[in-house]
Image (cartoon, rainbow, N blue to C red):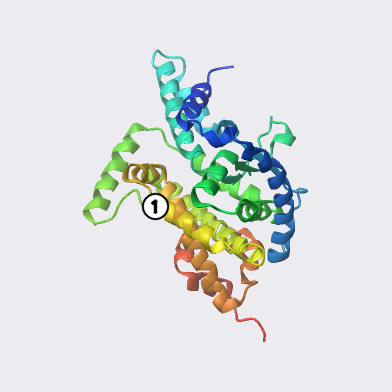
Amino acid sequence: MAPSAVDWGLAERVAIRAAGSDPFSRSYHADSLIADFDELTARAEEQVAAATGLHSLAGPARARVDDRAAWIRANIASFQRLLRPVTNRLDEKVGDGLLAPVARRAAGAEVGALLGWMSGRVLGQYDLLVIEDEDPEEQDLVHYVGTNVLALEKKYAFPPREFRQWLALHEVTHRMQFTGVPWMREHFLGLVDGMVSAVDQDPSELLGALTRAAEEVRQGRNPLDEGGVAALLSTPAQKELMEQIGGLMSLLEGHGDVTMDRAGADQIPNAVRFAQVLRQRRRQANPVIRVVQKLIGLEAKLKQYEQGERFIEAVEEVGGPDVIDRAWEDPSHLPTMAEIRDPDAWIARLGVAAPAA
């Protein structure tokens, strides 16, 4: 087998080194996480189904409590599947020339540094990618990064069971979106595959991107605001796909936050405080982290939570609490990024009317 365009082994080593260690990973408190998240993930599935009307077509949700290293390994597997069209194309261009090993190691180091940094921040994640050659028992999992959960509970004196249920509600809502809407997973992966497959490795594209960035700056706009370097280097066709992906992700993130608050409203009295703390942590990121967030597009993702919530609130004011179900009927009903920012446009396009009294 030819070597990959990315040295994934190096990526894993760099990421684990960059992730660092946390004393909570060896704490006796960690023993409670597995049993808690098994129980609370199952409970969250019932609550989310009752709140949204969605029911998983893929069986019960399964929780997996990871340390940072395990989360990194799971995401490297996902990255390998996601980036396969790009790495295959790079393999053809780079080949076995003298610079090939250098290029592979450089790519591995960059991916590793990114994953290592992210592993210290993520609390939970639903793994929606299906990897053809992996054990099914290792897929369709709701991951929780135990070290980070424990550290946050300690720092802010969060009631552990309550905070863990709150996290479970958000991640299980994402799983329900992808396993309860029959076409959602394939639609989303089709958009992402189209985006990744269209990547142009021609160096002249970089020059064109820099020219466009300079024009954005002259007009008083930050060229990294709408998706980081990926957006900056995108072709017009890719930008259209990014608009669709951005609209979908904003909807899913906003729907996740709204459902999390509603499904556990009577059992999680500290939900408002949990949300405030996490939003404050995003805002207080130091300048270096903010730059990194912009470069990789993470800051644009953080905006998705707020934009998605505002969209749902706006359309519910017109069509009632069940109006968002229209989005699950067909891919053509999903809001675009422009409609997320202008909910009235989505309301008009779908002919949303006020519910009967």
Residue 200 appearing in the image: yes
Q: On the rendered structure, is 97 left or right of 222?
A: right
Q: Which of 300 and 155 is in front in this view?
A: 155
Name the residue at 37% across, 41% down: 292
In the picture as drawn, the residue positioned furthest to the top comes out as 98
Image quarter (top left, top right, bottom left or bottom right) of the C terminus: bottom right
SS under mark 1: loop
Name the residue at 68% across, 54% down: 176
Q: On the rendered structure, is 2 left or right of 45?
A: left
Question: In this rendering, is residue 351 above or below 293?
Answer: below
Q: Name the residue under label 1.
A: 226
Residue 81 appearing in the image: no
> Mark 1 is on which residue type?
Glu
Residue 227 in percent (x, y) is at 41, 49
In the picture as drawn, the residue positioned furthest to the left comes out as 218
Image quarter (top left, top right, bottom left or bottom right) of the N terminus: top right
Q: On the rendered structure, is 211 left or right of 224?
A: left
Q: Which of 126 and 97 is in front in this view?
A: 126
Residue 153 in percent (x, y) is at 55, 48
Q: Which of 60 and 132 is in front in this view?
A: 60
